Amino acid sequence: MRAASQILTESFLDVRAKLLEVAATLDRIDRSADQDESLSSAAQGQREQVDAAIQILLSQGPDRAERLQKLFSRDYDSSWRQDMKL
Amino acid sequence: MDYIDPHIHMVSRTTDDYATLARMGCVAMSEPAFWAGFDRRSVDGFRDYFHQLTDVEPKRAAQFGIQHFTWLCINAKEAENVSLSRDVIAMIPEFIECPNVLGIGEIGLNKNTKNEATVFLEHLELAIKYDQQILIHTPHLEDKYQGTRMILDMLCDDSRIDRSRVLVDHVEEHTIGEVLDRGFWAGMTLYPVTKCTPDRAADMIERYSGERLLANSAGDWGPSKPTAVPDLIFEMRRRGHDESLARKVVYDNPIEFFSQSRNFSFVPRDSGSESDS
Ligand SMILES: [Zn+2]
């Protein structure tokens, strides 16, 4: 296994570029929202998901990717078979 | 490194792709039946498709020294049409004895509807009746978690299903644990944007070891990269992992899983004899 420092060093420029893309996209949305009307309710929901995702990135723990995936997922209801009568 | 792509749709790829895959070390592939990009209008459309999968593609692949295997079904997207699905399921036994057929697949869910679940359950009956292995498609994006849980419910509620003969494909970080914990095989799909990158696949191999884990390109007619499996091998190598770990995921595991199918007559490149399957 590679050392943590090595992984960070090797990934740093890539992570930096991806964070810049996110920052620039958020700026672009806000710029347009200033001139235009505000976000539709569907888009507002997406915007809130992005904010929640950024909070997950700032949190600790070994499972940020898994938690991000669950954030972007529909809920599972264990009674689905009864509900669908299957 | 010789490798096997366990999920690739070669009917949608060019002959040049076969040549490239052969040069990159692909020695065998399995092609599940899937959605053609349009809804077929009759059972005969599927009959022609199954002919292509069982007769035409094996010959195309053989020109490049690649052994071609396949899986039959009506996919989850077209399963919304239940009466057509039933006609196709009734026709599949015409092809089930073809020498390259490994089982029923890729069956699963798309939008997690009642019709899709109904047709999924009827495919399970077909697989059980003919003692076939099963290859499963899990939904995309926001539907994946819910759909994967629903699929696992249907499989685990049926005691006749042998979990070690079922491959659940397109797993990601939020579904892989449950699939492996419940005793199924799991496939990671290396697909741009909507599924998993080679880096994230390598992370999952590190987290879950390589046990019962496969990697595929799911190369098809959409944005996809048929050479994605060699990208994963390269990423594992770049991280300094033993060659044996990558080889387990891209070669040994597909052979171990497929060998449970009586039609898996794979011949390794450097031996003249068939694997004992
Ligand atoms: Zn597929």
Image (cartoon, coloured by chain):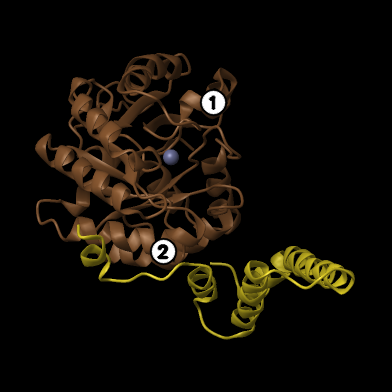
Chain colours: A yellow, B brown
Q: Which residue is mark 2?
A: B145
Q: Amino acid at mark 2?
A: Tyr
The reply, left or right, for residue B178 in relation to residue B23 is: left
The reply to whether label 2 and label 1 mark residues of one chain is yes
Identify the secondary structure beneath mark 2.
Answer: helix
Q: Residue furthest bottom?
A: A60
The spot of residue B143 in percent (x, y) is 45, 59
Q: Residue at x 30, y 53 (%)?
A: B114
Q: Is residue B5 above or below residue A4?
A: above
Identify the secondary structure beneath mark 1.
Answer: loop
Q: Earlier in the sequence, mark 2 or mark 1?
A: 1
Q: Quadrant of the C terminus of chain B?
A: top left
Q: Is residue A62 above or below residue B119?
A: below
Mark 1 surroundings within 10 Å by alpha-carbon count, few (fewer than 14), some (14 through 19), many (20 or more): some
In this view, the residue in front, B142 or B197, is B142
Quarter-of-image position of residue B262: top left
